[in-house]
Image (spheres, rainbow, N blue to C red):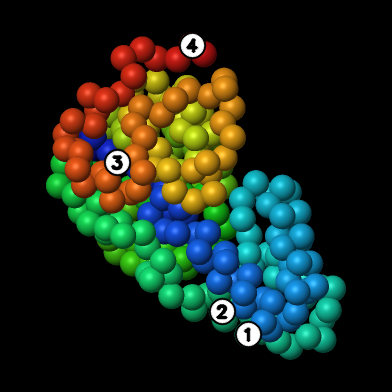
Amino acid sequence: MSGPADVVFLLDCDNTLLDNDRVQQDLRTHLERQFGATSAVRYWELFEQLRVELGYADYLGALQRYRNQDVCDMRLLHMSSFLLDYPFMKRLYPRALEVIAHLAACGTCVLLSDGDVVFQPRKVERAGLWQAFGGRVLIYIHKEQMLDEVARRYPARHFVMVDDKPRLLDAIKRQWGAHVTTVFPRQGHYALAPRDAAQLEPDITIDAIGDLMQIDPAALRLRACSTSPHR
């Protein structure tokens, strides 16, 4: 077996490489057009209920629950096609694929995402990300709870975690300390969301994922906080 890589770059998918807020807005518009405002509101209520129960977004699961309440509505068959056939590649943030190639020139790039076992892999594949990462795709329910497994699959002397959720960056930093550089792209609905004062600040904050093109990948490890957080 080969030894650990010098650096492994871990990149999130939704609202990090792909504008998932825009995807949701397109879905909202489609639901209202096909089913009406009242039915659309009900779908998103079921979606949020399921998110709380499972801990991740399950679009198809919410659709199944919606169907259980109206088993005669055959329009739902087209709804699943809308989700599975959505042109996700058009929703990649500008220069997202260039960033992956830029980082890959200096280390191993891995997509590390949360999600279900059907829709999330489909999204990653149709967005062109599965190919861009060379098949190095990890999808868990709670990725911050799977760091030992991540490190086992992709051992490294240093990790760089790029994610749009400050809560997750905080959790990962507390576990890996100076062994990881956390990068926060201020994109999506978490960009201006209220922050928990107890959360650790990301090592690097950028306005858009494309801004990583301006940073030397080899220097990212030097930007990690010099002291590990207290456990």
Residue 9 marker: 3
| Quadrant of the image containing the N terminus | top left
- Circle 1: element type: helix
Give the labeled residue for mark 2.
82
Residue at 49% from the left image edge and 51% from the top image edge:
188
208 relative position to 122: left or right: left
Earlier in the chain: of badge 4 and badge 2, it is 2
**Is residue 161 in view?**
no
Marks 2 and 1 in Cβ contact (< 8 Å) = yes
Looking at the picture, does residue 79 appear above or below residue 101?
Answer: below
* Number of disc labels: 4
* Residue type pointed to by label 2: Phe
- Circle 4: element type: loop
Q: CA distance from mark 2 to mark 3?
A: 32 Å
Q: CA distance from mark 3 to mark 1?
A: 38 Å
* Residue type pointed to by label 1: His
* Residue type pointed to by label 4: His
Residue at 36% from the left image edge and 12% from the top image edge:
227
Give the labeled residue for mark 1.
78
Looking at the picture, does residue 6 appear above or below residue 143?
Answer: above
94 relative position to 115: left or right: left
Residue 230 marker: 4
* Residue type pointed to by label 3: Phe
Q: CA distance from mark 4 to mark 2?
A: 46 Å
Earlier in the chain: of badge 3 and badge 1, it is 3
Earlier in the chain: of badge 1 and badge 4, it is 1
Q: CA distance from mark 4 to mark 3?
A: 24 Å
79 relative position to 93: left or right: right
80 relative position to 110: left or right: right
Looking at the picture, does residue 21 appear above or below residue 174?
Answer: below
